[in-house]
Image: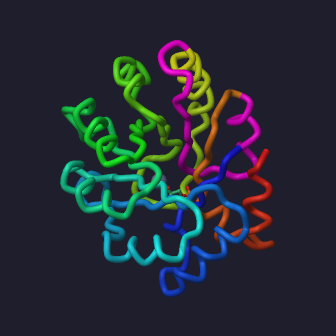
Amino acid sequence: MLVAPSILSADFGNLARDVAAICDAGCDFVHVDVMDGHFVPNLTIGPVVVESVAKVATKPLDIHLMVEDNNFFIDLFAPLKPEFISFHIESERHANRVANKIKEFGIRPCVVLNPHTPIESIEYLLEYLDMVLLMSVNPGFGGQKFIPNVVEKAARLKDLVLRKNPECLIEVDGGVSDVNVGELKRVGVDIVVAGSYVFKHKDGVGAAIKSLKV
Ligand code: DX5
Ligand code: ZN
């Protein structure tokens, strides 16, 4: 399992320290949650802060947009050269166009599905994607409870991916911990995002990341 700690649960007063800590501890990606206060009822960080994160990070960035205007935010974040930019299917009328735009920047496109959004909604998009992110909480906040039916959804997505685009990765985000990572692995999930579990682990970020690498 690849692990992408979400810096939403980091100490923003010590962001450089916390980003360095997860990279030194062997995470695979640094997950950055961008919220616009419209698509989700919360606001986070923009390119000025993420540029500082990118300077400290020794692992690639995984930027998760939770915004209404995907084009606007892609133009802001693409110059930081993240590995992935993820956008929500629920906020995009022209998902194929947006995926291709991300690819033209040399960045790997990913589409995100909210917990209630069926995988059939991306059946004809999968072949243009490098990753699909399944939300296992309602987006907007860290520290929420894992919605268990995402496991069945991931298993069904895996079947679809194998038929349509076997190279496409599956990521799960929200409420992930050592309790549910095993079942996610079993159904074919490649990357887990974990915020509060990693940054609030009693034995530190290193122990947390290690426990997710199943
Ligand atoms: C939620 C974010 C997540 C969040 C995960 O909207 O997309 O990345 O930070 O936090 P935990 O792991 O605490 O649920
Ligand atoms: Zn996220």
Work out whether 210 lies above or below 192: below
Work out whether 41 lies above or below 19: above
Residue 184: in magenta span: yes
Q: Residue at x 79, y 55 (%)?
A: 211
Q: Quadrant of residue 78?
A: bottom left
Q: Quadrant of residue 162?
A: top right
From the viewer's perspective, is 89 left or right of 30? left
Q: Residue at x 56, y 22 (%)?
A: 166
Q: Where residue 189 sits in the image (x, y, percent)?
A: 63, 35
Q: Quadrant of residue 185?
A: top right
Q: Where residue 116 sits in the image (x, y, percent)?
A: 41, 32
Work out whether 202 lies above or below 77: below
- 30 or 54: which is nearer to us? 54
Q: Quadrant of the N terminus?
A: top right
Work out whether 3 lies above or below 124: below
Q: Residue at x 25, y 57 (%)?
A: 73
From the viewer's perspective, is 123 left or right of 98? right
Q: Quadrant of the C terminus?
A: top right
Q: Where residue 204 sits in the image (x, y, percent)?
A: 75, 73
For the record, the magenta segment spans 163-186
Q: Where residue 213 sits in the image (x, y, percent)?
A: 76, 50
